[in-house]
Image (tube, grey):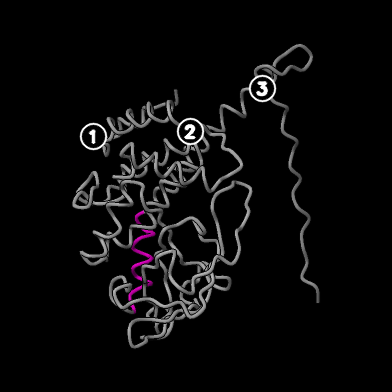
């Protein structure tokens, strides 16, 4: 079993230690780091399994079926570290349920929270967070997807890309330019159900670590007024507030991946031999001296 001494750190309490122990036992029994070829089906099944086991309750507040009064980053980090160590796809499924519902938790109306959060916690709705565009990655303020007001709501045109859970999500938390002000101050947030007229899955994207990923296209996509999430023109701040919660958990997941990789990488050095001696017991080669770099001259 992986080292658990970090659970004695002072910012964890008994509830965190119980959570970590329970999840470790569940993962050992229920998860496998190897997955089949149908990644969409695998991911859907993992969301349901995580919901049925109660782990997704940590993604939403207690008032909507969650485990805590608010989102507890320590619990989220512990869960992601453990899931990532056992199954990269399970960690992905959990993280996206949190990221795709976090903006609703922070800024949604009571009606929006009740419509989406309980189903997310039960694993009955798959969530997605649609921010990145073909010409707008970390520079969110330069996004081009636009939402124009209509008599009964909004009409959206544009595209998003590298959207996790794209193609299998039941809804997307989507950001678009509404023009209240230039740059980041002119962006708003919307909840878009996957069956919204004008929403198209333009491309499914394949990556080295398989998971649902897609480019979305919006062609005169119609949304009702109540699809607006939070205050108009505040979408950039809402996106950053959501990402701030889950950024810490990315480091925890990376640690989980590393803790699984290290034994796998080092195990062969115990059994493989050179001159009848295992690699693991051989003295390392002496480092070659580093020559000082030749001085450089500015050309005239």
- Name the N-terminal-most of marks 2 and 1: 1
Separation of residues labelled 3 and 1 (CA atoms): 39 Å
Q: Which structural element holds mark 3?
A: helix
Q: CA distance from mark 3 to mark 2?
A: 22 Å
Q: Which residue is at the front of the view, 78 or 200? A: 200
The residue at the point 22 percent across, 52 percent down is: 64
> Mark 3 = which residue?
269
Q: Is residue 112 above or below residue 272?
A: below
Give coordinates of residue 127: x percent, y percent: 40, 56
> Which numbered tag is attached to residue 15?
1
Report which residue position mark 2 lands on: 86
Residue at x-position 51% and y-position 31%: 32
Badge 1, how many Cα within 10 Å: few under 14, some, many 20+? few
Quick one: 265 or 37, which is closer to the camera? 37
> Bounds of the magenta span?
233-245
Dot 3 or dot 1, earlier in sequence = 1
Main SS of residues in magenta: helix
Disc 2 to disc 1, how far (Cα)?
21 Å
Q: Number of callouts in the render?
A: 3
Q: Quadrant of residue 151?
A: bottom left
Would residue 97 appear left or right of 84 to someone viewing this image?
A: left
N-terminal of the pair, mark 3 or mark 2, is 2
Q: Is residue 83 magenta?
A: no
């Amino acid at each position: 079993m992986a080292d658990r001494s970090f659970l004695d750190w002072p910012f964890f309490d008994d509830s965190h230690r119980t959570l970590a122990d329970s999840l470790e036992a569940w993962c050992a029994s229920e998860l496998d780091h190897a997955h089949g070829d149908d990644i969409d089906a695998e991911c859907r099944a993992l969301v349901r399994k995580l919901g049925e086991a109660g782990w997704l309750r940590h993604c939403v507040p207690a008032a909507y079926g969650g485990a805590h009064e608010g989102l507890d980053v320590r619990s989220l980090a512990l869960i992601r570290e453990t899931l990532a160590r056992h199954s990269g796809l399970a960690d992905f499924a959990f993280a996206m349920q949190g990221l795709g519902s976090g903006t609703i938790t922070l800024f949604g109306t009571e009606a929006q929270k009740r419509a989406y959060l309980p189903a997310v916690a039960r694993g009955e709705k798959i969530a997605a967070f649609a921010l990145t565009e073909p010409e707008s990655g970390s520079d969110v303020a330069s996004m081009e997807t636009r939402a124009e007001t209509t008599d009964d709501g909004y009409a959206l045109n544009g595209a998003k890309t590298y959207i996790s859970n794209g193609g299998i999500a039941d809804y997307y938390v989507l950001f678009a330019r509404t023009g209240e002000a230039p740059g980041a101050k002119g962006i708003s947030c919307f909840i878009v159900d996957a069956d919204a007229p004008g929403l198209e899955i333009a491309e499914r994207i394949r990556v080295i670590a398989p998971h649902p990923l897609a480019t979305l296209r919006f062609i005169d996509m119609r949304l009702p007024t109540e699809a607006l999430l939070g205050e108009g023109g505040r979408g950039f701040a809402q996106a950053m507030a959501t990402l701030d919660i889950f950024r810490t958990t990315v480091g925890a997941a990376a640690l989980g991946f590393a803790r699984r990789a290290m034994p796998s990488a080092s195990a062969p050095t115990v059994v493989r031999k050179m001159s009848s001696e295992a690699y693991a017991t051989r003295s390392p080669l002496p480092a070659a001296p580093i020559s000082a770099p030749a001085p450089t001259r500015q050309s005239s």
